[in-house]
Amino acid sequence: MNQTVTVNISGIVFHIEVDAYEDLGNYLSKIRSYFKNSEECEEIMTDIEARIAELFNEKITSDNQVVSSNDVEAVVTIMGKPEQYIDEDEGQEQHQQSFSSKQRTYSTAKKLFRDSDDRMIGGVASGIAAYFGMDAIWLRLFFVIALFVGFGFLLYIILWIVMPEAKTASDKLQMRGAPVNIDNIGRTFKEEAEKVSENLKKNGQQYGKKAESAFEAFFSFLLHVFKGIFKVLGKIIGVLFLIVGTFWLVGLIGMLVGSETIFSITSDGIFSIESSDFFNLIFVSENQFHLAIIGILLAIGIPIITLIYAGVKLLFKMKTHYSIGLGLFIFWIIGVAICGMVGIRMGTELTHDESIINIKVLSDNNDDFYISASTDENPGEGILEDRYSVISLDEDSIYLNDIRLYIYKSKNDSMELKVIKNSNGKSRKDASNNAKMISFNYSITNDSIFLGNYLSTLKENKIRGQEVRLKLYLPIGKSIYLDKSLKRIIRNVDNVTNTWDHDMLEQRWIMLEAGLTCVECNEIEGINLTQVDSVRAYEPIIEEDK
Amino acid sequence: MKIENTKAQMRKGVLEYCILSILKSGEAYPSEIIEKLKAGKLIVVEGTLYPLLTRLKNAGLLSYRWEESKSGPPRKYYQLTKIGEEFLKELETTWDDLVKAVNLTRKKN
C-alpha cells in the first residue's frame, strides 16, 4: 500500500494516498486558477471542496478508509475539468487561453514564513496564522499562555530562528498558499479584502467548522514542530551514543585482549591494571580465562554495541529488522550466562579459607621494643596499583602487600608476635596449602621487630586472597616505639586516648592496665609517666581480641 | 464563429432557467439540483453548477442556509428569493415565447 497523508477537506479528515493527494492538489489548483479572476473564487472553491469531501465520504467504506488515485480520478470525472465548465463570465475566453498556456503544475504548496507586515515581536504568530488562514490573535494568545506554562519562550525563539521572513510578494503568497504568478501578486490585497468580507457574511455554523479545521491543522503543525525538535535532539543523542559507545568498546577490547595498561580514574586516585597478567593470576586455567573474556565481551560489549547501533540509527534513520535486536539480546544473555558460570567457578575457588599461625615469643629481657617495617617497593613490575595496595609480578612470583599489624594487650606475661597467613581455596586443603605457600619476611631481635611490607607466593598459586595479619601482644609494663615506616600496615590499634593510628607513629607507647598509653605525649589528658602506677590500678577497659 | 461557443451560449441561458425552475418547488442542495440536471442531460460535470449557483446568489436571485449533513460537510440549501421568483416568472414567459418562436420558425423551414 502507498504512503498516505491526512488531509482536511471542508472540515472532514481523510487519509489519502500520496499520489492521489498530488492529483487532487493539482486538480484544485487548476480550478482555482480558472476562477482566479472572478470575485466569487473563494466561495466557489469552498463549495467545490465541500462537494468533493461529500463524494470522498461516499467512497469510503469501513473496509477501505483510504482515498486512492482511482477515487480522485472518479471525483474529477464527476466534477469535471474546468475546460468542461459552462461559464458565463465575459472573460472566459481569455481565461481559457491563459489557462491552457499555464498548464504547468502550480506551486500551491504553502510555506511557513514569518509575517513581518503584521508582527508583534518577530511575526511568528502572524506567519503561522497566515499558513492556516486563521486569525493571529489566537496564536498570540497561545504563545502568551505558553510563556506562563514555561516552554513558550523557547518555542517562540526556536520558531523565530527556523521560520524565514516573508520578504517578497511571492513569499507572502506562498505564506498563504496561493499559486505564485504575476497576476496573483498584484491581486493579493484584493483577495484578502474579499476574504474578510466573505468571512463576515458566513454564519456561525460555518465559523464553527472553520475553527475546528484550523484547530486540527494547528495540532498537526505542532506535531511537526515537535517532531522536528526531537529529530534534532535525536541527532545529538545519536552522536553522543556513537562517541561514548566507541570509546567504551575500545576500552573494553583493550582491557581484555591487549596487554596495555588500562587507567581508570576513581575517587581513590588513578587505578591501573596490567590487564592480561592480572587476569592470568585470577583464573584457574587459560581456558577459563578465555571463556571469561568471551563472557565479559558479550555481557558488557553488547550493551555498548547496542548503544553504538542506536546512535547510528538515530543519526542515519536506518531501517532495521527486529531480528538484529533479538540477536543482540540473545548474545547478551549468553554472555551473562558465561560470566555467571565463570563467576560460580571462581567462587568455588574461594569458598574455603584457612590460616597458618606462627607464634614468636619475644625476649623477656627487654622492656622496650623498636618496631619498624620495610619501606621497599614491591619487587617486580606492578600490575595493579592504587592508594592502598599494589600487586606486582616478577618471573615466577606474585607480590602482594596485604599486610596488617594489630596491637593487643597480652593475656599473660609474655610478649608475642602472632604471624597469621590467610588464604582462600576451593577446599580446606587447597586453602591451607595456599596459606603455607605464602612467604613473608620479618626479623626479631632482642629489642626490635622488623616487618616486611609485602608477601609473596609463586605465580602458579594464583591470587587467592592471600594476606598476612600480624598481631603483637604486649604484656603490661612493656613499651614499644612505633616507627613511621609502619604507616601502611598499622591498623586500628586501641589506646586509652583513642589516638588515630597514624598519629601513634613516632611515639613511645606503654601497655598499662587501662590499655596502650602514650609515654611522652603531653597533651594526653591526666596521664603522664609519673602517673603510670596509678593508671596501672585502673580496670582494663579494652576488649580483648581472640 | 465556432459551434462550440454557440452551443455553450444556448445551454447557459437554459441552465440558469432550469436551476431556478428546480428551486421553484422548494429548496434544494447542489447534489439534488445536479441529479435533476443530469437526468435531463443538461450538464455533464458537476463542477459547472457551483459557479452558476454562486453567481445567481450574488445577483440576489437565490439565498441559502446551512444544514448539517450526516454524510459529509454541511450543505448549502438554496431557495429562490423574491427577486428570484420574479426573475423566474419572466424567464418562463420568455421561454414559452422562445419555444413558440422556435417551433414556428422550424415548421416553416
Image: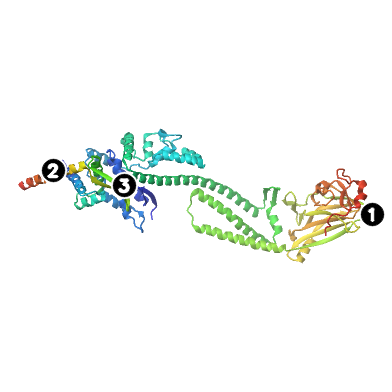
**Circle 2 residue:** B94
- Residue type for callout 1: Asn
**Do the residues marked 2 and 3 share a common chain?**
no
- Residue type for callout 2: Thr
> Which mark's residue is nearer the viewer, 1 or 3?
3
Q: CA distance from mark 1 to mark 3?
A: 117 Å
Q: Is residue A181 visible?
A: no
Q: Secondary structure at mark 2?
A: helix
- Tell me what residue is drawn at x 39 percent, y 50 percent: A5
Residue A483 picture location, percent across and down: 85, 47
**Circle 1 residue:** A365
Crowd tier of the residue under label 3, counting other residues whose Cα lies within 10 Å: few below 14, some 14–19, many 20 or above: some
Is A128 left or right of A239, judged from the image as shown? Answer: left
Chain at tag 2: B
The quarter in which the C terminus of chain A is drawn is: bottom right
Q: Residue furthest right?
A: A365
Q: Residue furthest left?
A: B108
Compared to residue B24, the image places residue A356 above or below, namely below
Front one among A509 and B1: A509
Q: CA distance from mark 1 to mark 2?
A: 152 Å
If you read the primary sequence from the N terminus, does the residue marked by circle 1 or circle 3 appear first? Answer: 3
**Do the residues marked 1 and 2 share a common chain?**
no
The quarter in which the N terminus of chain A is drawn is: bottom left
Crowd tier of the residue under label 2, counting other residues whose Cα lies within 10 Å: few below 14, some 14–19, many 20 or above: few
Residue A262 picture location, percent across and down: 67, 50
User: What numbered label is drawn on residue A49?
Assistant: 3
Residue A302, quarter of picture: bottom right
Q: Is residue A243 visible?
A: yes
> Which mark's residue is nearer the viewer, 1 or 2?
2
Chain at tag 3: A
Front one among A100 and B108: B108
